[in-house]
Every structure is written in structure tokens, then in C-alpha cells.
């Protein structure tokens, strides 16, 4: 649904992340500053619960990023160890052949 405000410009839909209206969408005009709610008001319980859920999600996302970083480090270490193992076996066979 497209909303045209009084200044005849198309209003954009944004999402509020304030404590009073977490996740509530609204129209706003970049020119004249018109604001109008798209979503109905949330109940008190939703307003109380959503910020905690968002914090928990953000913490989980940070933990996931940290785990990905650690996994990449371990993968690089494994690649180095595999190369070292291959070169050590090649060296072993060369020395064994020379004896």
C-alpha cells in the first residue's frame, strides 16, 4: 500500500525500535515530516517482552559471529597442520630412500 502525504510525495514505511513502540511500523514523509502509524498499538505485554527478546537475539547473533570466527581460526590451523604432515611424510620418504 502506497501512501501519498499532503506534500504529494510518497511516504516511506519504517519500523520503530523505541521502548514504547518496538517493532511497530509507521509511514513517514522525508519532505514534510508527516508520520502515521501502519500497525495498530501493541498491548502492554508485547511492549514489555519485545525489548528483552531483541536483546537476547542480539546476544545470540554476537555469540554466533564469535563461533564462526573461532571455527575459521581452527580451520586455518588444521590446514597448516595438514600441510606440515604432508611435507613431513615426503621428507621421511626422501630420507628413507637415501638410506
Image (spheres, rainbow, N blue to C red):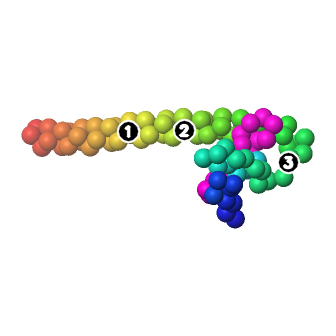
Graded by Cα atoms within 10 Å as few (under 14), some (14 to 19) or many (20 or more), the crowding at tag 3 reads: few
- The span shown in magenta is 9-23
The location of residue 67, given as percent across then percent down, is 54, 37
Name the quadrant containing residue 21: top right
Write down the residue under mark 3: 41
Furthest toward the left, the residue is 98
The location of residue 4, given as percent across then percent down, is 67, 59
Write down the residue under mark 2: 65
Q: Secondary structure at mark 1?
A: helix
Does residue 47 appear left or right of residue 92 in this picture?
Answer: right
Q: Earlier in the sequence, mark 3 or mark 1?
A: 3
Cα separation between marks 1 and 2: 17 Å
Cα separation between marks 3 and 1: 50 Å
Q: Which dot marks residue 76?
A: 1
Furthest toward the right, the residue is 44
Cα separation between marks 3 and 2: 34 Å
Q: Secondary structure at mark 3?
A: loop
- In the rendered view, would you say 84 is above or below 4? above
Marks 1 & 2, CB-CB < 8 Å contact: no
Residue 90 magenta: no
Q: Which dot marks residue 23?
A: none
Amino acid at each position: 500500500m502506497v501512501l501519498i502525504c499532503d506534500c504529494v510525495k510518497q511516504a516511506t514505511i519504517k519500523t520503530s525500535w523505541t521502548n514504547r513502540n518496538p517493532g511497530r511500523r509507521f509511514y513517514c514523509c522525508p519532505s514534510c515530516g508527516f508520520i502515521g502509524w501502519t500497525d495498530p498499538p501493541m498491548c502492554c505485554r508485547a511492549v514489555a517482552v519485545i525489548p528483552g527478546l531483541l536483546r537476547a537475539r542480539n546476544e545470540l547473533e554476537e555469540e554466533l559471529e564469535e563461533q564462526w570466527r573461532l571455527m575459521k581460526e581452527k580451520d586455518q590451523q588444521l590446514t597448516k597442520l595438514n600441510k606440515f604432515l604432508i611435507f613431513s611424510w615426503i621428507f621421511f620418504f626422501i630420507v628413507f630412500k637415501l638410506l
